[in-house]
Amino acid sequence: MNIVVVDGYTLNSGDISWDDVRALGDCHIYERSSSDEVIERCQAADAVLTNKVVFSDEVMAQLPNLKYLGVTATGYNVIDVDAASRRGIVVTNTPAYGTASVAQFVFAQLLHWAQPVGYYDQSVKARRWSRSDDFCYYDHNMVELAGKTLGVVGYGAIGRQVAQVALAFGMEVLVHTRTLPADLPANVSHVDLSTLASRSDVISLHCPLTEENKGFINAEFLSLMKPSAYLINTGRGPLIDEAALYDALLQRRIAGAALDVLATEPPPVDHPLYSLNNCTITPHIAWATKEARQRLMGIAVDNLQAFVDGESLNRVNDV
């Protein structure tokens, strides 16, 4: 079997092994592939692994040998799944590899806001403590999480993990999700979006991006939030109307935001949110611990091995 990995760098920058993929066939691994390079590189491929490279109907039409597309991510919107099904191409994804890592990252962001260790570390190393008249100083926002309310939008595996950690901190949790859970733990309540917006001290987004919820964090939603509230997004950038968020942060209508994802990735060099001191931005890394990437690699290999064996594992289409 001829296997091509079209954009392997984000999964593996060199700290984990491709050996299990190579063991399944004649394997060609590219760190990145432009749209102009995909057809040539995949011309003889039976199986392709992709993360962000798009496989449209037009692209698949030019790959006569292609039988399998494995997405090295949970979301698979880079594939025209209907077209793949018509062409008899199996499509798989890699779910549930990063639940612990993303939940951990949410609380790294939250704790950075609640007790800004970095700010105080820098001030101490600038000799401010050495010049202090007192044994301590505290002139930057610090918040105790116990007793605060966390709003979780989306209650899949990651949302549930975030809620569980929040409960361990003594927080109350409000949840909004399309599918009402059969049962919820104590101190977790299902509410509508308006209630979640108005009652939460912190809001964390964990819902998939759909046409219906694109930009739902808009001016109206933000106007319902407490001026002291904090917004965290480790989900998908387009869930947020970034212009509305910029205005809300600039006018201090909410306290702050932590964004691991943006509407355009990589973002433009002059992105307006860069200018705000109450908005932290990280480069879509909540999922990217070595442990999570190793799990992702293992799932991708298992998916491909199942396909070779004539079995179905994490398929997202019927062929």
Image: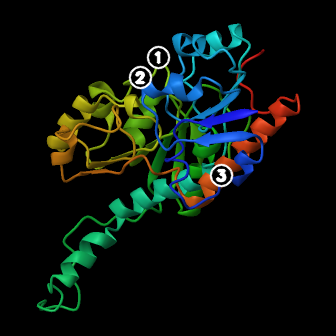
Q: Callout 1, which amino acid?
A: Glu
First-in-chain label (3 vs 1): 3
**How much space separates mark 3 and mark 1, taking CA atoms?**
36 Å
Crowding around mark 2 (Cα neighbors within 10 Å: few <14, some 14 to 19, many 20+) is: some
First-in-chain label (2 vs 3): 3
Q: Which residue is mark 2?
A: 214
**In contact (CB < 8 Å): disc 2 and disc 1:** yes
Q: Is residue 291 visible?
A: yes
Q: Secondary structure at mark 2?
A: loop
Using the rendered view, name the quadrant where residue 42 is placed: top right
227 left or right of 41 in image: left
The quadrant in which the N terminus is found is top right
**How much space separates mark 2 and mark 3, taking CA atoms?**
36 Å
Q: Nearer the viewer, mark 3 or mark 1?
A: 3
The quadrant in which the C terminus is found is top right
258 left or right of 208 in image: left
Q: Is residue 54 visible?
A: no
Q: Secondary structure at mark 1?
A: loop
239 left or right of 73 in image: left
Q: Callout 2, which amino acid?
A: Lys
Residue in view at x 66 percent, y 27 percent: 45
Q: Which residue is mark 3?
A: 18
**In contact (CB < 8 Å): disc 2 and disc 3:** no
Residue in view at x 57 percent, y 13 percent: 62
Residue 156 vs residue 56, the one in the foreground: 56
293 left or right of 34 in image: right
Q: Which residue is mark 1?
A: 211
